[in-house]
Image (spheres, rainbow, N blue to C red):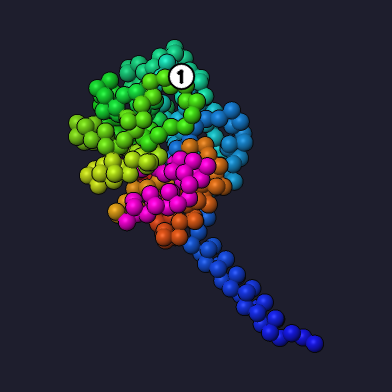
């Protein structure tokens, strides 16, 4: 005998699951991605394959100057090349290689100008002031900010906190509060700045800077990484930024984290519309970097 009640119940459950799945797919973003926070890695081929797999068509990359050369000729992902400094003891935090061949902590300002003229530098970043133990508004940075303003180069500044084993003896977490950007944004009003890691956990400072300076954007790298920030913390932080009206200035970033996990974390924010997710994954970065 056929159990019609069980059949009806099974049909209802299956239909409900299909509906929920389709809703989830409809609300998820699966298009092209602009990763605004990436670093060189030892296994470059694997990294490039992973970027292609996840449709990362553009990425802003920063690391030691020499390590970036291979990215200039990548066929599948278009890379914007950054200039990382100031380097604690002349090395890149965590990885430990020299930032520059001569081993200096700051690049020669005349050399920087020539690299910009030769179109070998697309942005200044990741700026490592916090690792170096100084404010992003420290006067030692002014000559570089002047050049960035002159050539209309974006600046990406490390904010928030840092992981262990960063090889930076003068690291100062208090220098990671985005509110410290205020002085340079007043002194150099033409600067285009993005707050890396969205300033997390310094939400109040991040909100203040984004509110008062419309040319400032923020990437959500580290914050969106579930291996670093718990899902509820990420969701709460993002909801505050969205409710404050900053949906047009938040940008995707992976910081070399697991792309599957990070993309899934952003898509899992059910308070975001598909249009808002598209902005975060791609459109906002395109606008910030002035890409046609």
Residue drawn where x is 33% and y is 40% of the image:
202
Q: Position of residue 138 (x, y in %)?
A: 26, 24
Work out whether residue 42 or residue 130 is closer to the camera in this orientation and state it.
130
Work out whether residue 193 or residue 24 is closer to the camera in this orientation and state it.
24
Residue drawn where x is 55% and y is 68% of the image:
20
Q: Position of residue 223 (x, y in %)?
A: 44, 43
Residue range in magenta is: 214-243
**On screen, 185 above or below 239?**
above
Q: Position of residue 168 (x, y in %)?
A: 43, 21
The answer, for residue 58, to whether it is visible in the render is no
Side of 105 where 185 appears, left or right:
left
Q: Does residue 240 show up magenta in the picture? A: yes
Side of 111 where 1 appears, left or right:
right
Q: Residue furthest top?
A: 102
Q: Does residue 286 show up magenta in the picture? A: no
The answer, for residue 249, to whether it is visible in the render is yes
Work out whether residue 171 or residue 120 is closer to the camera in this orientation and state it.
171
Residue 172: name its quadrant.
Answer: top left
**On screen, 256 above or below 141?**
below
**On screen, 119 above or below 282?**
above
Q: Residue furthest right?
A: 1
Residue drawn where x is 59% and y is 41% of the image:
50
Residue drawn where x is 64% and y is 73% of the image:
14
Q: Position of residue 1 (x, y in %)?
A: 80, 87
Q: Which residue is mark 1?
A: 91
| Residue neighbourhood size for the residue with mark 1, other residues' Cα within 10 Å, grouped as few (<14), some (14–19), many (≥20) | many
**On screen, 196 above or below 175?**
below
């Amino acid at each position: 005998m056929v159990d019609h009640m069980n059949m009806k119940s099974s049909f209802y459950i299956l239909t409900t699951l299909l509906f929920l799945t389709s809703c989830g797919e409809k609300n998820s973003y699966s298009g092209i991605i602009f990763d605004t926070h990436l670093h060189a890695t030892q296994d470059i081929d694997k990294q490039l394959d992973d970027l292609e797999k996840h449709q990362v068509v553009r990425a802003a990359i920063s690391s030691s100057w020499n390590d970036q050369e291979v990215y200039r000729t990548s066929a599948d992902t278009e890379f914007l090349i950054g200039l990382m400094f100031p380097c604690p003891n002349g090395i890149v935090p965590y990885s430990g290689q020299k930032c520059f061949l001569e081993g200096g902590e700051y690049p020669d300002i005349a050399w920087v100008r020539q690299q910009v003229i030769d179109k070998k530098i697309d942005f200044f970043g990741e700026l490592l002031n916090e690792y170096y133990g100084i404010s992003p508004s420290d006067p030692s940075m002014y000559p570089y900010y002047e050049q960035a303003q002159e050539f209309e180069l974006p600046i990406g500044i490390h904010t928030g906190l840092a992981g262990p084993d960063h090889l930076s003896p003068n690291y100062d977490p208090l220098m990671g509060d985005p509110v410290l950007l205020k002085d340079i944004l007043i002194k150099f009003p033409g600067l285009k700045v993005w707050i890396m890691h969205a300033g997390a956990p310094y939400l109040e400072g991040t909100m203040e800077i984004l509110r008062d300076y419309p040319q400032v954007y923020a990437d959500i790298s580290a914050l969106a990484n579930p291996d670093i920030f718990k899902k509820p913390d990420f969701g709460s932080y993002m909801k505050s930024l969205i409710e404050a009206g900053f949906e047009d200035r938040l940008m995707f970033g992976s910081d070399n984290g697991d792309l599957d996990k990070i993309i899934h974390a952003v898509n899992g924010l059910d308070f975001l519309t598909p249009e808002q997710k598209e902005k975060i994954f791609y459109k906002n970065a395109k606008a910030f970097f002035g890409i046609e």
